[in-house]
Amino acid sequence: GAVVSQHPSRVICKSGTSVKIECRSLDFQATTMFWYRQFPKQSLMLMATSNEGSKATYEQGVEKDKFLINHASLTLSTLTVTSAHPEDSSFYICSAQRGYNYGYTFGSGTRLTVV
Amino acid sequence: DAKTTQPNSMESNEEEPVHLPCNHSTISGTDYIHWYRQLPSQGPEYVIHGLTSNVNNRMASLAIAEDRKSSTLILHRATLRDAAVYYCILSPTGNEKLTFGTGTRLTIIP
């Protein structure tokens, strides 16, 4: 149990375009989901906390107008990278927790390449 | 956030036990100790978590020091598939964000 599905797994887009990444909890409801970014040979960095039915909470230094987060249902959160640039190329990962007695479940990640 | 300290890398022989240490001297009374691992090009995978008592599951064991200022993740019989970066993370109760450190890169020698 506690499966998080993330799509797409890989995406290549042109500079200036927008890309949407979906994160779904398949067998549990998640009022909160988390979005991370990971550059090569670095650790995961939390970008934002996605809250169902309300605005996301962004970490310091993360542009909320560039990384749009929508958490419209208890099983789906989306991250849209707007006006993507090559420096946005990274590995984006979402996670959710089934309940506080459980660990966190992570998606398989999305490799974004902006050309 | 309370910080953890882990060795950058460790090596172990296949089919032998592995003990991965983590220091967390500033842990608070409500912080859970989480362990996750990440294989190349994949999202992290939950391994185990605990509060005060030692914990066992099908993947590993977690040994927590009596003063809770350190813990050890134990893989009882390492396989090549256990080669990954292992992260030790403190998190308070509830649906709180996880802050990842640099972790320990575990290499398994055939």
Image (tube, coloured by chain):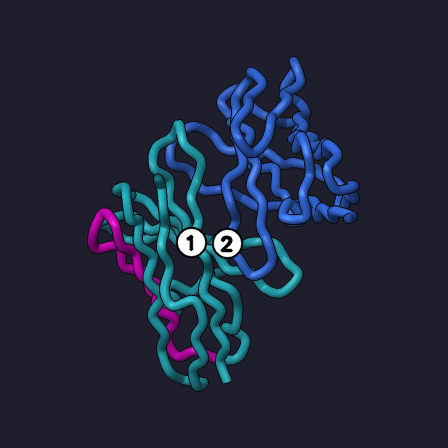
Chain colours: A cyan, B blue
Label 1 to label 2: alpha-carbon separation: 6 Å
Image quadrant assignment for residue B73: top right
Prevailing SS of the magenta stretch? strand
Height in image: B105 above or below A85?
above
Q: Are marks 1 and 2 in contact (CB under 8 Å)?
A: yes
Q: Chain of mark 2?
A: B
Q: Amino acid at mark 2?
A: Gly
* Residue position marked by numbered label 2 in the rendering: B43
Image quadrant assignment for residue A101: top left
Q: Is residue A44 visible?
A: yes
Q: Amino acid at mark 1?
A: Gly
Q: Chain of mark 1?
A: A
B110 magenta-colored: no
Pointers 1 and 2 within a single chain: no
A81 magenta-colored: yes
Q: Is residue B102 visible?
A: no
Report the front residue among B80 and A99: B80
Q: For the N terminus of chain B, which image quadrant?
A: top right
- In the rendered image, residue A72, in percent from the top left (x then y), is placed at 21, 55
Residue A107, labelled with which disc? 1
Q: Is residue A46 left or right of residue B107?
A: left
Magenta stretch: give its range.
A68-85
